[in-house]
Amino acid sequence: MTDVIQKPEAPLNFIRAIVEADIKAGKNGGRVQTRFPPEPNGYLHIGHAKSICLNFGIARDYNGVCSLRFDDTNPSKEEVEYVESIEEDARWLGADWGANRFFASDYFERIYACAERLIEMGKAYVDDQSAEQIRENRGTLTAPGVNSPWRERTPEENLDLFRRMRAGEFEEGSRVLRAKIDMAAANVVMRDPALYRIKKAHHHRTGDAWCIYPMYDFAHGYEDAIEGITHSICTLEFEDHRPLYDWFIENVSVPSRPRQFEFARLNLTYTVMSKRKLRMLVEEGFVSGWDDPRMPTISGLRRRGYTPESIRDFCDRIGVAKSNSMVDIAMLEHCIREDLNDSAPRVMGVLKPLKLVIDNYPEGRVEELEAEYNPENPGLGWRKLPFSRELYIEQEDFMENPPKKFFRLAPGQEVRLKNAYIIRCESVVKDEKSGAVLEVHCTYDPETKSGSAASSRKVKGTLHWVSAGHAMSAEVRLYDHLFLKENPDEEKDFKACVNPDSLTRLTSCMLERSLSEAAPGSRYQFLRNGFFCVDTVDSTKTKPVFNRIVSLKDTWAKIQKARQD
């Protein structure tokens, strides 16, 4: 296990307290073994990151083992693409499972034998009811269920029918194998749950060898037992399933006795975490794919520019709780800002360019000004910035008729150009028809060069800029929340609150020339505009694309400061 999943000083949450108590009591011989068990039916999202950090972190900190196990029991929704993406994302977060990579399909024969044994013991039966009839007869929270008319079949008849199910004799939906527990159980999950269903779909690993597949609830506990899992850590929605998990372990011969524990899943504002809903967003074209930078998937966050360190820090901060709650997405954004503040080079990029001409600067002259990459991290070094008569500044940094306390550029007003000179606005050139400002004409004070002994004169505004003749053109993509509602899951149709302005493409941005060699995935702070990452999919040498990871405004830090005050 690598040393990067969770900090060794991770707080003692209730799961870790259970693990420590079990070790102290000598349970499982002091051994700790966890697992991360994704279903390969979609890409991992930020909620899975929490589980990865928890399971692999516990294994590391208590000298244990954590397995990666794919619960591939539903072939109609599973693909090799998802298996590969899950492995890539988990490794990127720092997970290391070594040789402990397993699949539920590795155990299909053993799980099937387990089902036959339950039939022989009279604890499972083949039911001919349709799925709809089974639902209708299950009862409610206040009314018991109704026994299936096929519940009293003999073990011999059930075994024959089950083997014929495996042989492919029956159609999908015509029969299921159910556990024979108690149709009047207070816990509805225990009312004769399904163990196997007929599904004539090609499996990505076993091909067409099987046409019946175990249900997740049945397979999961047995997989844990086979692998020697000591602490089977699940999200809170499986709490009602724990008695069923234990029933399976108690009623079949298993090599070990795992225990299940539940913790609260991650719910994030302005986001959905259901893989089913995320798949709908992809398949219905609301996003460009699973790795769309607006998606809460690990691949989407990575493409947008999030670092594994920032996501692990986020998981540490939110902790592990016993009850569900909603986490403000501002906390996640705060984590990436904190991570990049020191590590990202600070450069200049003009997103909406406005031409600025310095009339008293010599034509044809180019100065090479020195600029530090990051004053918080001197180790990043310096670079040369070309300075010339014609520059670009941000359109929003100039106003012809500014309000009070507008400390940027306006007629007769002075500002400093970052790492350069103080300039004064003298005039503007406008479009004759629209009245739009096309150029701003200024003069500069050659005695105010940054870093010189005579540069002590102060002005209130400082602007970023790029030299017009040396800038590189790029596309910049600005991202907003994917949803307009804080909790889209509460809406009748979550897709109705997709934000139509969640992506803005700026195709005529001008960036300083030092970015011409920026590698895909590299991260920068564009002064005053936020943190950006070179897109790993669409960016090319001739058409670079930068994704804004996050703006500089940190609402979470302000919230925390207000709480402290």
Image (cartoon, rainbow, N blue to C red):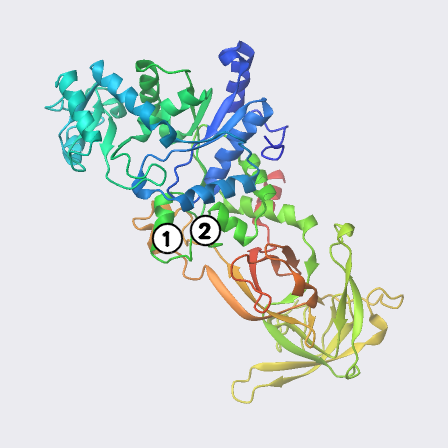
Residue 224 vs residue 17, the one in the foreground? 224
Say which amino acid is labelled 1. Leu
Say which amino acid is labelled 2. Met
Residue occupied by mark 2: 295
Using the image, determine if residue 146 lies above or below residue 122: below
The total of numbered circles placed on residues is 2
What kind of element bears circle 2? loop
Most extreme residue toward the top is: 25
**Rendering coords of residue 472 (x, y %):** 64, 70
Q: CA distance from mark 2 to mark 1?
A: 9 Å
What kind of element bears circle 1? helix
Which disc is residue 281 wearing? 1
Can residue 132 be seen here?
A: yes
Q: Quadrant of residue 546?
A: bottom right
**Rendering coords of residue 536 (x, y %):** 55, 56
Most extreme residue toward the right is: 453
**Rendering coords of residue 15 (x, y %):** 50, 24
Asked whether, in this view, residue 539 is left or right of residue 492, the answer is right
Residue 118 vs residue 302, the one in the foreground? 118
